[in-house]
Each structure stands twice: as structure tokens, then as C-alpha cells.
Image: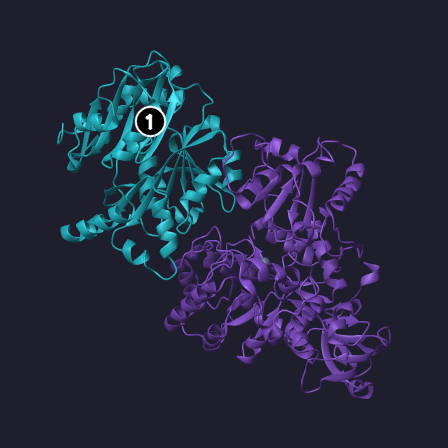
Chain colours: A cyan, B purple
Amino acid sequence: MSGAPSRTVEYLMQVSSEVSPMSVSADGSPLPVTIVGGYLGSGKTTLINQILNKASGRRYAVLVNDFGELAIDAQLIESEDGNVINLSGGCVCCSYGNDLTSAMMELDTSAIDQVVIEASGVALPGAIAGSLSLLTSYTLSSIVVLADCVTVQSHASDKYLADTIARQLASADLILLNKTDLLDESQLVQKKDWVRSNYQSARCVATSHADYPVDLFLTEHTSRDVNQCDKTNDSETHLTSVYTTFKLEVKDKYNVQQLAANLAETEPGLLRVKGFARDLSGQMQLIQIVGRRWNVRPAPVSAKEGIVCIGLSADNLCSEGVSARAGLI
Amino acid sequence: MITIYSAKKIVTMNPARPEATHVAVRDGRIIGTGALAELEGFGAGTLDDRFANKVIMPGFIEGHSHAVEGKWWRYVYCGFFDRMDPHGKVWSGVETIDAVVERLKQRDEAMTDPETPIAGWSIDPIYFAEKQLTRKDLDRVSTKRPIGIMHASGHIMNVNTRALELAGFLREGIDNGGLPLGDDGLPTGELRGPDVMMPVGAHAGFDSNMLDFDEPGLLDFGKLCVRTGVTTATDLAARLTDEIVGIGIDVTSRDNFPVRLSAYRFHHGLTPKELVRQVMNLTEKSTDRFRLGRIKIVADGSIQGFTARINPPGYYNGAPNGLWYIAPEQMLEIYELALQNNIQVHTHTNGDEATDLAIDMLEKALQKFPSNDHRFTIQHGQLVNAAQFRRMAKLGFCVNHFANHHFYWGDEHYQFTVGPERAERMNPCRTALDNNIPLAIHSDAPITPIGPLFTAWCAVNRITGSGRVQGHHERITVDEALYAITMGAAYTLQMDHEIGSIEAGKRADFAVLEDDPTEAEPFALRDIGVWGTVQDGRVFDASQL
Ligand SMILES: [Zn+2]
């Protein structure tokens, strides 16, 4: 399948829509949260604007440390009211200042489908994830950390910033090595090698202008989401030939947690995995993986077994190899 | 209308005329000091003898306080040390968990609704010889109403079971360093760090904006100032929303409001450009008693919270280095824009790495925008070392040290945070002066009580809570300490041309004292009584507030 353009949403959706929306997860299940971190100038704002621009009916709450750091595309803004900016399509952007936990508790979760937290340039995404774990109405979907490929290495050895940058990158499920358009090929290879050798557990993808298919790290957990997605027919989410998509055959019963962990931990090329498999007791489970972070939740029996994987074409992944290594066959 | 006050002694802090018996005041300004006959040359005036038995000093200046202390006194005081409230009542320190429970019960019994929360503040369990304070202790006060007590350091809170329940944290399976668990697998009720304190604290009656003053709170803060001889204070990390600015201007303009307040806009929540733009706009709203147009940056966290950024060898107990609250580029940009627009910046640094950063950034910014008299000030600078002072002197940095800290947490720093050697040189006032750094000293009220004579006592004696002298070599003299709480602080606030000494042309701001601090035993400095103040020529008798 390598090289053939495919459509992210379609593939991810295909899995979702094979079961009745209400049964994927009942309303009231925890809202997925994506934490976007990275030092100043790494491209967080660009990435978040992309998420908002591609919202296609999904209602995001974007929480920013302060509005100052997030220059939202003007055409998205509908109204502003103190700490809240209302955006088109039901999205909101709120500044949380010093008190993220309270801001999360105050969010009207019935009016949103997903939460994206923009961490400040010196904040530690891992610490944010720690406080998030206290809030039962949310679940961490992934930590995405951007790195400016030109400056990241010097920041990582900077007298003042070294440990902060290291802690940020080490907490990432997915590292977007951004601004690659500013480097030539050999420089880029060197930067990639540096990231991969220092932060082995995270996935690392090279991007320019934070251009990454955001659906690969945003996850859906709620029935509302599935309904919304059903209506979308977004032609902009074509995956380029940089990415490859393939399906894993799932027929047996498995230790699903172990299976998910295997896929997340032993397949550094996989960026996104979503699918259904039966656990040892026969109960259907939903597997979601973003980068190295995996999540398993009960799914309805009517769900159809099968797992969709998306990775980098360059990593030459194939269904057979991944299945074998993950213990599927 | 000239009023001539006589006094047992007037300590002017003006080297040209250090002592006087009389001071003449007209329209809120000092027109002269000296003997009565000298002052009569200004023309007919009224001789006011009410201070004939008092000692008059320049009104004290608190260069690092938060006006929110007035509001915090509406919470129940649970501190280990005696502390005076705005009404002059001295609350005795509570020394055991039982005593804490007893004090909260008194509040509980005075309340009619059984579910209204009780918020307490300033508890310091490190002084309790007993076991840890837990939610079960506070449940003895009530299981129906949420109860929370903020620790003196401001970094930890203890709550009862009801408060945890309301916040949704009374459950098993919590895995978060901010919420330690008991043997039963449930949180003990101790909340470490703002991420867990704030959401639970809201249920226990704490305001979510911990640093915003309100009208009654500001009025009460004014009373505390009169009782401690303060005529100019700071609100050093203000959000300064339109609402807060409105309250500040309104309350301070009232005839009976006794303090001049300089409010520094906290950097957080704005880009450097937006921050400087906003502060320049605020300058236009500045009034005589509510000064606006300056910036406060917070660079790192606190030493006792292990969030300060410190250089090797790091924390004594091996804790990892602390957190940055601003990126280096942002600090540099604020410094540059501020220098360019002639705006003063005070920077909170606790750890020495944070101080290094401030020094490096100012050095860079000054190369681009040279300034002969910026008076940028390091606030706290608790771990500044001699080498840093030498650079600071060249760059024109001032310092305002947290002298009180030594008394309240000196023993803890010695044992846990930075260890003996560095604990003995924390808040190094002596080294600052030896390097010709303009020096002020502060309380950081409400973290420790406002009271410049007490702060001076701390800097002069360097006594810790357990009674040890910690760092003899960093002690300063009584005269130097008195200078720091008057002229020194005035200089760091860019007000030394207006206040800080009693001399012709300056504001008629006096601290009216029962005894002469310059003659007092250094150890008795903190016991000198304060009769009240004169501020802009208006007399405030502490016993009549
Ligand atoms: Zn402070």
C-alpha cells in the first residue's frame, strides 16, 4: 500500500462507523485531551490553528496558557469575552493562566468533543498530564511536542533550558521535528538521528509549517464525535505518500492490553493505530494508539474486529511484519 | 496652612540634618525640619504637640507586599507565630493540631449554615512535633462543611474529607504527587502545589484569584500599614484588570485611606509586547496614591517548594531543579521593550540560576537600549552570591531581599532545601551593601506579616525560628536596616525624590513611634511600638482605626 494516497478520516472512520455510534462509548465517557508542548517558536500555534481549521464539525476547546501565545487565525474568531474566545463551528479557546485544573473543571464538557491544551514554552507537558489524571471526566489522548529543528539541539544544551527541553521531549508520545524546510537533507538526517537517539521511545516525524495530519493524534471517544465524523466528507485529509496505511487481521482472542502495548512499544514506525479486538473473555475492546501511548476501552460486541495502522512509508512497515511482532499471528 | 509637629526626636534619614525636634508641614508636604525657631521663618503656623513624646521617622516603605493580605484576614488565622490583624487584635500562634482544630471549631460554632466552607491560612505543620496533619483532624471540626487551610508558604494546603469529596478527589486509584495517599488508599487531604490546591481550595472558600485585592480587603490592608508605620506599600504581582484598577483608584483616593500603593503588573498572561503596551496605558491612569506603570516578572518558583531554579550543587535533599515561569527570550524581550519605553521592571528570582538569567538578560538588553538609571530590581534574590552582586552592581541592578524568610524558614533551608553553607548566606544583605547594591528588605506579606521594623530586626539579627543566628557575616547594622526600609525601598520604587526621608520638599509621610529605633538594642527593634502614621500630612492614629 506504500505510496498510495489514502484518506485518514476515511480509514479511521471506517472502523468507527462499523458499529452503531451510541455503542462506541456512551455519552459522558471521558473527553479526549491532547497536550501540545514545545519551546517558543517551535510551531505550537501553527499546529493548533491547523486543528481548528480542520475541525470539520468537531467542537474543540483549546486551552492556552495565555492568549498572547496563540495568534488564532482571525477568520475563525466569532466573539471574544474575557478569558474565552468563541470560534466558528462551536469551538472555543480559553486562557487558563495559572490554573489549568480549575479551567478544566469549569469547561462545559457537554458542549465540546475534544480538548487541546497548549502548554507554555517552558511548561512541562508531563506535569500537565499528571494533573489531568486527577480529572475523571478527561482522558489523555496524547502528548505532542514540537521541536524547531534548527534550534532544538542548541536549546537542549543551553545553560538555562537544557533540562526543560529534555523533560519536554522525554514526555512526548509524538515529536514533530518542525521547520524542516529550513534545513538541507543531510542536516535534517543529522537532526532526526539526534532526536531518535536521545528520545527513543517517542515517534518522531519531520514536518514543515507544522503540517501534520492532525487526525493521526486526535482520538475520538464519544458517540457525539462519531456522529460528527459521519457527516464529514473532508477531502483535505488525504494522506500524502509520506504515510502508509494498512490493516491487521484480527481473528483470535487476545490479551488486548498486551497487544496494544506491543504495538505501541515495539513499533517505532507506527504513528496511529485504531481498531477492535476481542479479549480473552470474549469482550470486544477498542484499541487506540497515538505514538507510544495506548488506550484500551470496552467496545460493543457488534464492533467488527480489525486494526488500522498508519505509519511512515519510509519505515517500510507491512501488515505481516507488524502482526508477527505484535503477537497477532 | 502650616502645621509644625514637635517630637521627642525626629530621625530624618537626611544626612544633611539627621535629627530634628520639629517638622513643618504644608499641604501634605514637608517644608522644613529643625528647631521651632528655624521653622517659624516660613510664616505663621499651628504648633501640634501631640507627638511631643514620640519619635518620628520617615514613613516606612514596604517594597514587596501584596495588598491581598487584607482579604486573607477574612480566613481563619492558623499560624504558628502570633500575628496582628487589621483591627489590631493579636491572634496567638497555634502550636498543635488540637489547637488548630479548636480555633476552627470556634469559627464553626459562630456560623449558622452548616455547609458554608471555612478557609484558614498560614498553618505551618513543620513546627508541629506530632504526626502529619490529615483530613481526619479537620473532620473533627466538621464533616458537613468543606474546610481548607493554606500553609504559611502558600505552596501546600490541607483540607477535610468534605472538601475532597466536593472536588471529586475522595476516591481510590489516584496517582499524583500532589495528592499523597493514606493507608486506606485515599488522599490524606494534603494538597501539594497549585494544580491540586486551586480546584479543591475553591470548594473550601478560597478565591480563585489569590492575588486580587477587593474593596474591604484593601481598606483592611491600609489599617495594617498604619499599625506597622507603613505609608507606602506595593502590590507586587497585580493582574490589574479594569475592575481591579477601578477598585484601586477608588479606594486609595478616599480621604481616610492611609497608604500610597504602587502596583506592579504581573507579566503572566500577556505577550511581552502586549504587556508593555498595557502597562504604558496604565501609566496614564496612575494617581497620586495608586501608582501604575511598572512590571513584575516572576522567573522561577520558591526554594521551600523546590521550584526555584538553582545552580549546582542543586537542592540539598537531591530534589530535581525547579521550574521556569518565563522563557529566557520572553524575559529579554520584556527587558528590551521596558528599557526602550522607560518602564521599570522588578524580577522575582529565588534560585541563583534564575538570578543568573536576569543578569544575563539585562546585560544583553542594555547593550541594545542603554539606560543610566533604570533601577531594575531583583526581588527576593535569596541565593544571590558575591560574584552575581559584582555583575549586578555594574549593570545597575537593585535588590530587595526577603529578610523575614530567614526567621520563618531559615531552619528548613539549613536542614532540607539548600543545606548549611548556602542557608547561612541566603538573603545576603551585608554582601549586597558591600557591593554598593541599592538594598531594600521585605515581608512579602501575606506570606509573612507586614512590619518593616520586624523586617529590619530580621536583617540585623538573622535569627531563625529556632533561635539560632544563621550567617553572622550577613548581618547589617540597625542604621543600615532603617535605611533599607525607608530610603532604600524608596529608591527601588523610583520614589526617593518624594519619600523615604524627612526633608524639605518631600511628602509629609511619617512613622510615629513610641521609642527611638536608632538607640534601641538591635534585638529590641521589633518590639518598638507604633503609634500610627502621618501620610501626605493626614494623621492616622492606629488606636482609632
Ligand atoms: Zn511576592
From the viewer's perspective, is B370 left or right of B247?
left
Question: Within 10 Å of the Cα at label 1, are there few (<14), some (14-19), or many (20+) other Cα atoms?
Answer: few
Name the image quarter holding residue B144: top right
Task: Where is residue B280? Give x, y as percent.
Answer: 49, 61
Q: Is residue B1 visible?
A: no
Residue type at mark 1: give it: Gln
Disc 1: host chain: A
Say which residue appears at 38% left-offset and 54% top-offset: A163
Count of residue discs: 1
Task: Where is residue B430? Give x, y as percent.
Answer: 59, 76
> Disc 1 marks which residue?
A258
Q: Is residue A123 visible?
A: yes
Task: Where is residue B216? Give x, y as percent.
Answer: 71, 50
Say which residue appears at 49% left-offset and 77% top-offset: B393
Quadrant, the N terminus of chain B: bottom right
Say which residue appears at 65% left-offset and 78% top-offset: B480
From the viewer's perspective, is A177 left or right of B434?
left
Task: Where is residue B217? Give x, y as percent.
Answer: 70, 51
| Foreground of the two, B148 or B22 | B148
| Foreground of the two, A224 or A127 | A127
